[in-house]
Image (tube, grey):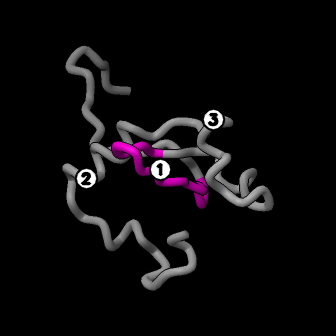
Amino acid sequence: FLEETIPKNIATSIKDNAFLDFFFRHLRESRHDDLKFLPPSVRHDYPYVSLCGTERNFVRPADAVIVFHSITKNKNETKN
């Protein structure tokens, strides 16, 4: 569990855009089959998982699970 490692803020340590794109593209809600790999006492703490082959990366969001890589403005939007 990465929250027990140093550095505490793993997001600032991961800078590779290709990795982040892959990780978040594979992020989904944990299913019963995923949760069997976690100890029962922490299953409710990890509502999301990102799959990488046979590896499961369990995620406990600190604030929000929505992640934006970039935001583009629609050319047809009007300015207010």
Q: Residue at x 59, y 60 (%)?
A: 62
Q: Range of the magenta residues?
A: 50-63
Location of the C terminus (image quadrant): top left
Amino acid type assigned to the residue bearing label 2 in the image: Phe
Between circles 3 and 2, the one closer to the viewer is 3
Within 10 Å of the Cα at label 3, are there few (<14), some (14-19), or many (20+) other Cα atoms? Answer: few
Is 16 covered by the magenta stretch?
no
Give the numbered dot on residue 19. 2
Say which residue appears at 26% left-offset and 22% top-offset. 74
Question: In the rendering, at what x and y percent does residue 2 appear?
Answer: 50, 71
The image quadrant where one finds the N terminus is: bottom right
Amino acid under disc 1: Arg
Q: Which mark is residue 56?
A: 1
Q: CA distance from mark 3 to mark 2?
A: 23 Å
Tell me the residue at 42%/50% (across/down): 55
Question: What amino acid type is highlighted by mark number 3?
Answer: Arg
* Residue 59 position in % (x across, y down): 54, 54
Describe residue 4's horizontal placement relative to residue 7 as left or right: right
Among numbered discs 3 and 2, the one appearing first in the sequence: 2
Q: Is residue 18 left or right of residue 51?
A: left
Q: Secondary structure at mark 2?
A: helix
Taking depth in this image into account, of 14 and 33 the one nearest to the observer is 33
